[in-house]
Image: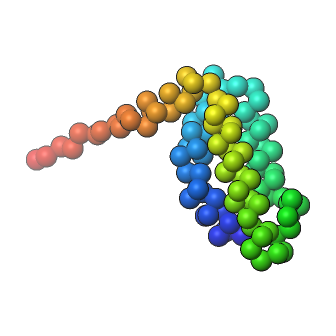
Amino acid sequence: MFKKFAALYALIRKDAAILWYALRHPARPAWLRPSVAMIAVYLLSPIDLIPDVLPVIGLVDDLVLIPLLVAWLVRMLPEALRRGYADAARTVDVVPVRTR
């Protein structure tokens, strides 16, 4: 099961970061939290479109469907939130180091 999560995260790393930023932003759309919650429930649920007991095919639906849904949610976000993530990703807090 952890291999499933690792493979999904590798596919949708940037989109997941954008969604995480948008979930914490005060200007997030009202539909965002329930949508992300439904994706999480589907991912953790033992009920799938194709059961996971089938060796390869059972994981393929999750590896295809979840990234498509996450990419679709990111596309549906307001442009200001996506731009805000890009701005936040570019800024790096640098702490000056004291030398003696």
What coloring was used for the rendering?
rainbow
Do we see residue 24 in this rendering?
no
Q: Which quarter of the figure is the N terminus placed in? A: bottom right
Quarter of the figure with residue 31: top right
Q: Residue furthest right?
A: 47
Q: Is residue 3 above or below residue 21?
A: below
Q: In screen coordinates, is 51 left or right of 89?
A: right
Residue sitting nearer the eye, 63 or 84: 63
Q: Residue at x 86, y 59 (%)?
A: 49
Residue 9 position, x and y percent, is 60, 57
Residue sitting at 64 percent across and 43 percent down?
Answer: 71
**Residue 54 screen position, x and y as percent:** 82, 75
Q: Position of residue 66 (x, y in %)?
A: 71, 52
At x 64%, y 29%, the residue is 77
Residue 51 in the figure: left or right of residue 43: right
Q: What percent of the width, then of the height, locates residue 98? A: 18, 43
Picture layout, residue 31 above or below residue 49: above
Of 90 and 63, nearer the camera is: 63
The tally of labels here is: 0
Q: Is residue 48 above or below residue 18?
A: below
Give the side of residue 89 with respect to residue 48, left or right.
Answer: left
State whether residue 21 appears in this view: yes
Q: Quadrant of residue 48?
A: bottom right
Query: Which residue, as the protein is rendered here, is positioned at the far left?
Result: 100
Q: Can you say whether 71 is above or below 13 in the image?
A: above
The residue that appears at 57% across and 24% down in the rendered structure is 79
Q: Nearer the viewer, residue 74 or 22?
A: 74
